Image (cartoon, rainbow, N blue to C red):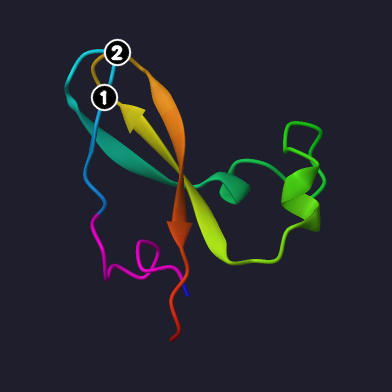
Amino acid sequence: MCPVCNGMLAEARICPRCGSEMADAGRVTDFYGPYSPYMEFDSFMRKETSCIHLYTCQDCSYDERVEIELTEG
């Protein structure tokens, strides 16, 4: 299970562009369908050992994807 999705971990990120705090916008898979052309091909071949979250900066609109390791639950 993903500790960020389940509220067990608050992953704090700082924007590398402007230094502001970034907000968790949720899982990347929530933005794209399961067979979206925008998802990397490797993501379909990989076992689910992590959850990819999208973090966005409210000040400069920079975004990045962060891999969160799944835990036993």
Task: For the residues labelled 1 and 2, say whether their Cβ atoms are less than 8 Å apart.
Answer: yes
Q: Residue at x 28, y 13 (%)?
A: 17
Q: Secondary structure at mark 2?
A: loop
Q: CA distance from mark 1 to mark 2?
A: 9 Å
Hey, what amino acid is under mark 2?
A: Cys
Q: Is residue 6 left or right of residue 52?
A: left
Q: Residue at x 26, y 64 (%)?
A: 9
Q: Mark 2: give few (<14), some (14-19) or many (20+) Cα within 10 Å.
A: few
Q: Is residue 24 above or below residue 18?
A: below
Which residue carries the number 1 mark? 15
Q: Residue at x 52, y 58 (%)?
A: 51
Q: Position of residue 69 (x, y in %)?
A: 45, 63
Bounds of the magenta segment: 2-10
How many numbered discs sit on the rendered protein? Answer: 2
Pointer 1 or 2: first along the chain = 1
Q: Position of residue 65 (x, y in %)?
A: 48, 37
Q: Quadrant of the C terminus?
A: bottom left
Q: Residue at x 40, y 63 (%)?
A: 5
Q: Is residue 6 left or right of residue 70?
A: left
Label 1 or label 2, whichever lies nearer to me, is 1
Q: Secondary structure at mark 1?
A: loop
Q: Is residue 31 above or below residue 60?
A: below
Kindly report the secondary structure that dominates the magenta region of the rendered protein. loop
Which residue carries the number 2 mark? 60
Quarter of image, res 40: top right
Q: Is residue 71 above or below residue 62?
A: below
Q: Position of residue 67 (x, y in %)?
A: 48, 50
Quarter of image, res 12: top left
Hey, what amino acid is under mark 1?
A: Cys
Residue 51's disc number: none
Q: Is residue 50 above or below residue 31?
A: below
Q: Does the stretch in magenta take in 8?
A: yes
